[in-house]
Image (cartoon, rainbow, N blue to C red):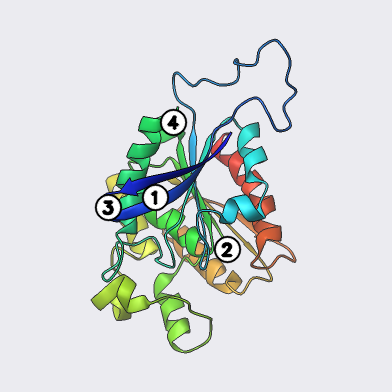
Amino acid sequence: MFLSCHYFSFVLGRNVEVNVIVPTPEGNEQITAEGKEARYDYENGLPVVYLLHGAYGDNNSWMRFSSVERALQAHNCIGVMAGVENSFYQDMVHGSKYYTFMTEELPAYITRIFPASKKREDTYIAGFSMGGYGAWYLALSRPDLYAKSASMSGALDIAALYESAKEGAVESPFAWRDIFGHLTDHLAGTDRDLFTLYERDRATGLVPKLYQSCGDKDFLFELNQKAHKRLTDLGADITYYEAPGHMHNWDFWDQDIKRILDWFME
């Protein structure tokens, strides 16, 4: 079942559109007269996967360009897709409070309206590109919310990416100072830096499990390799996948989300 939900967000101060997929007997499933309800434990709550978009994307990106609905159906889990503009999933200094929306208001809405589990061990988050950073940023910032977090082709070193953008080495659609304000020129070591967040979580003993993937033809491949080494040097246990021949596009992400859902639901 696919639903497009329109409601007023008090955090964002406007009406928002959120797409939600709830598994029902359809898709590739053989529909018979017996056992239709056996797979769907709506009463106790289904696992939830938050699917984050990249730069230029919105809440419709996953529905338009991937087969994620069938993949979610196969795993009996709910999928949630919201739009956050080019915000890096932050509470912007000059703009919307997308971090608060994603970690507080949206989960409360989903668990109240839909048959979604409220348990950390049933809650997952995944994204690509900007959303790859976002998935790890939200999970490492709020490790109490998410059991596992997956990044595909993620912009994982936010400080290094900003420096590359400032030098013109990579395309940058981001209003950096509107997003990060006075932190923009020294993001490393702040609570927007994934490496700092990981070390903090490790010190408290609560760390979500991490998945990282990138195509070896992706313009963010070297950044991902360096991020992986840096985190593993810190002791991180990361499920890591390099995709031969793949670039920064949906051909890769549509394949990889199936691997990620398998990993989420192990």
Q: Are marks 1 and 4 in contact (CB under 8 Å)?
A: no
Residue drawn at the location 71% of the way across and 59% of the way down: 251
Residue that mark 1 sits on = 139
Residue 39 picture quarter:
top right
Callout 2 secondary element: loop
Q: CA distance from mark 2 to mark 1?
A: 17 Å
Q: CA distance from mark 3 to mark 1?
A: 20 Å
**170 vs 25, nearest the viewer:** 25
Residue type (three-letter) at the residue carrying disc 4: Phe
Residue type (three-letter) at the residue carrying disc 2: Ser
Residue that mark 3 sits on = 11
Q: Position of residue 185 (x, y in %)?
A: 31, 81
Q: Are marks 3 and 1 in contact (CB under 8 Å)?
A: no
Q: Position of residue 218 (x, y in %)?
A: 64, 70
Callout 1 secondary element: helix
Q: CA distance from mark 2 to mark 4?
A: 30 Å
Is 185 displayed left or right of 252 in the figure?
left
Residue that mark 4 sits on = 114
**109 vs 242, nearest the viewer:** 109
Residue that mark 2 sits on = 153
Residue drawn at the location 58% of the way across and 73% of the way down: 222
Residue drawn at the location 45% of the way across and 56% of the way down: 83
Farthest residue, direction bottom = 167
Q: Earlier in the sequence, mark 2 or mark 4?
A: 4
Q: Earlier in the sequence, mark 2 or mark 1?
A: 1
